[in-house]
Image (cartoon, grey):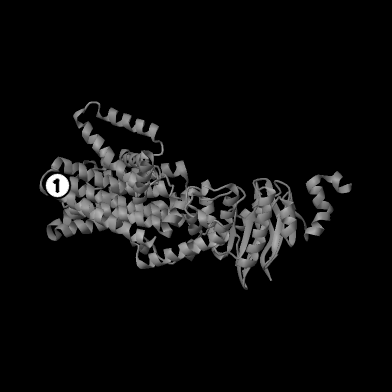
Amino acid sequence: MAILSVNKLTKSFGGLTAVSDVDIKLQKGELVGLIGPNGAGKTTVFNLLTGIYEPTSGEITLDRDGKQTKLNRMKPYKVSKVGLARTFQNIRLFKDLTVLDNVRIAMNQNINYGVFSGLLHLPSFRHEEKRIRKESIELLDIFSLGAKVNEKARNLPYGEQRRLEIVRALATKPVLLLLDEPAAGMNPAESAQLTDTIAKLRSDFDLTILLIEHDMSVVMKICERIYVMDYGKVIAEGTPDEIRTNKRVIEAYLGEDAANA
Amino acid sequence: MKNLFKKSAVIKTISIILIFAIVQILLLTNIINDYYFTTLVTVCINIILAVSLNLVTGFTGQFSLGHAGFMSIGAYTCAIFTMRMSSTLGVGAFLIGIVLAAIAAGIVGVLVGLPTLRLRGDYLAIATLGMAEIIRIIAVNLDITNGAAGLSGIPRDVNWFWLFLFTAGTVVLITNFLKSTHGRSCISIREDEIAADSMGINTTKYKVMAFVIGAICAGVAGALYSSFFYVIKPDLFGFLKSIDILVIVVLGGLGSISGSILAAILLAVISTMLQSFAEVRMVLYSLMLVVIMIFRPQGLMGSKEVSLQLFSKIGQSFKKKRV
């Protein structure tokens, strides 16, 4: 059963077609990579999936236990509510807020009390806030950020900011997680640690993951399947081994000469 | 943790009651005379206005230049109602008038907020500015508001009890709101709107929510104003009034409730002290604003709050220095 099917997805900005006729299918529980040279349109695909951009044409369907939802023309907050969560290529944390607040904000869909109760701090407010606080700290503990709950997000080291973004995405209780270059700017030791984290989070949180990444050591190690994009099109799809030897992929990355060599 | 929470709540409640009681005693013994009481009323009304504008601009990050417009709606609604009903209902007319003022300002807040809050930054500022001007022009041209001459002879029902109740109420409710999930959602919009949206926050809904709560509070402030000063006219709620409120908010610190309160008090004190230099009063006042902004560009409090923890922190650093 495909949890996400993207069918002939196209996005043009004026005369420029950033993404054209992209087909992607993700099976439940899969960990799939999306790679390609700079400007290939990978992040645009993420923005289309999460509703930040409206597709020019094409269809995006999310299948959550047989319940199908069309994601085209859905606002980002609604996309989040049906179970898609993401991280951002250039970290977008709530920088001036604490680590705990970053996670609590992402848990907003999971909090049940009204504005009135919030204004007057009625018992339902106290009860829910206590629960959310506990859940947030538990989640942060899993990613060893538990000791930093009261620090401002902007004061965390770079690697921890990336990890906090993942925790924040998980706090929305997604079924499908989109990670946009989680290893960007990390040193080899950090990215090796991240690779383990991603593999672990898929099994622990019962997730399907789509991963954009430039660091091939990460992609080749953990992804079961890989989509390769170039100039807005999917040029190849297959297992890491197939992709490694695919002529068109080598061409896209290294040029025609290298592919013929 | 739980202990501290309860303790701080108790201390807060006690200090609120203490402030009320002390001022009440000072009023009864006439240490606060009519002149000072007028200043006190202005301070309280400015606190309501500044704290509520801070919710919109400082916490939710939506730059509004139309706050005086909502104040105007509240002032006129309450004035028109109390002038007609006061003889039969007494103080009840004033209280119903305040509720009506809040409702009217809230409704206009929704009507204005829904279309304009799609705009960002400067554009929103211009749109809200235009909205306040429209409200002013309507007040100038309607019969029921008595045009440019305004309304006079509004029954005065505001006393220290009502004034304090509404001021403290506004501050407590908005502080509570900011600590709830709805308040956090508003703050996340200021921090990063796209990220907030992607975390499942309906940004339009929360922007309108903050805007409407702000409008309701401004409406209440306007109602208190009309009832105390018993004369209102459209010019009182023009562009300059909106700027006055914004000055308090920026001076106190965008994103600090206690900053807004401090700034409202400080500006009233400065302006009262300068009364004796009538000719250069506004020059000195403006100069002082410039100087404060140069040395504290983030405002008096930045985005921090006056809290028990802050006091204990200051105490600790003080101890360390002495050792």
Q: Nearer the viewer, residue B50 or B85?
A: B50
Q: Which of B263 and B147 is in front in this view?
A: B263
Q: Residue at x 59, y 47 (%)?
A: A158
Q: Which amino acid does label 1 sit on?
A: Leu
Q: Which of B142 and A137 is in front in this view?
A: A137
Is residue A80 rendered to the left or right of residue A129? Answer: right
Q: Which of B27 and B56 is in front in this view?
A: B27
Image coordinates of residue A161 in percent, x first then y, are: 57, 50
Q: Label 1's element?
A: helix
Q: Which residue lies furthest to the front in this view?
A: B323
Q: Residue at x 54, y 56 (%)?
A: A145
The total number of labels drawn is: 1
Q: In which quarter of the image is residue B86?
A: bottom left
Image coordinates of residue B7 in percent, x first then y, are: 32, 59
Image coordinates of residue B268 in percent, x first then y, are: 25, 39
Q: In which quarter of the image is residue A73?
A: bottom right
Q: In which quarter of the image is the N terminus of chain B?
A: bottom left
Task: Write down the residue under mark 1.
Answer: B26
Is residue B144 rendered to the left or right of residue B323? Answer: left
Residue B150 appearing in the image: no
Image coordinates of residue B253 in percent, x first then y, are: 38, 42
